[in-house]
Image (spheres, helix red, strand yellow):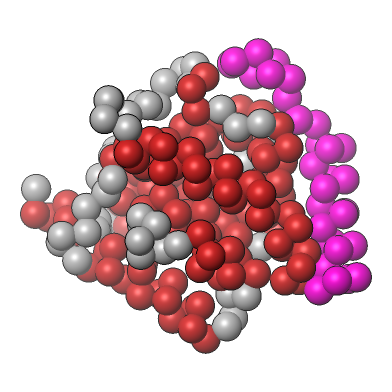
Amino acid sequence: MTVNGTVRITGTEMKETINQFEQDRRSNGTRKAVHSLISEALLIWMDALEQASTENDEPCRVSMTRTGCSLDRDTVIRITVGMGEMLSIRDAFLISAIVDEQRASREFLMDFAERPKQPSNAQRLEQLLSDAFRDPSARPDMKRCDQAINMLFDIIDMIPKPYRAQPFAVISYIMWWMGQEGAMAAAISALAIDDQCSLAAIVYSAVERHIGPAWTSET
């Protein structure tokens, strides 16, 4: 059982979705397979981020229960498989947390997930990450980031350990972007599962060298 009483997802369920995704890629091509896998899940995720971002009350802070930030079972499976199978999918979910929809629309994020090597998509993502890192005025939307972290912890609660590396890595990056001390612990958790997880290694190195986004030096 998970902390909120939902039955954990099994390795068999994960493998079935991975196999279906791989079959879809062979039959229909990567773009259609990615769209089929995560298009609905991305909309659910984005709706939750936008709702948190626009609420007037206090954000849903990271806690042991996190019942207000839960995702349904199918969405959890699709997000986890997507993050593990294609880094472009992982990066689309990551960007969605640290950049608002005015700068990174749902349409762009979906297109990037489907076609990461498209020059305009690759350049746009690189620019968004560069701006977030180098621009002192690019400050986190704490409510949006908190909601993303909470949903990712919900995902981790539900999935088998071997599939947790990328969700932990995304948490580590978002926490690093927010200037939170938990970034290092999340990066270590990811690397303990997959020592080749490059995103976690980047965050680990940045925290160890006391490198942060530009806005943190202005506070």
Viewer-side residue, 190 vs 126: 126
User: What percent of the width, then of the height, locates residue 53?
Assistant: 34, 40
Viewer-side residue, 208 vs 46: 46
Viewer-side residue, 166 vs 96: 96
- Left/right placement of residue 177 relative to residue 95 reads left
User: What percent of the width, then of the height, locates residue 118?
Assistant: 57, 83
Where 10 falls versus 129 (above or below)?
above
| 170 magenta-colored | no
- Left/right placement of residue 52 relative to residue 8 reads left
- Left/right placement of residue 191 relative to residue 105 reads right
Q: Which corner quadrant holds the N terminus? A: top right
Q: Is residue 21 visible?
A: yes
Quarter of the figure with residue 82: bottom right
Q: Please identify the dominant SS of the magenta region.
A: helix
Question: Which residue corresponds to the image point at 31% horizontal and 71% vertical from the top-left?
Answer: 130
User: What percent of the width, then of the height, locates residue 16?
Assistant: 87, 45
The residue range painted magenta reads 1-29
Where 150 falls versus 110 (above or below)?
above
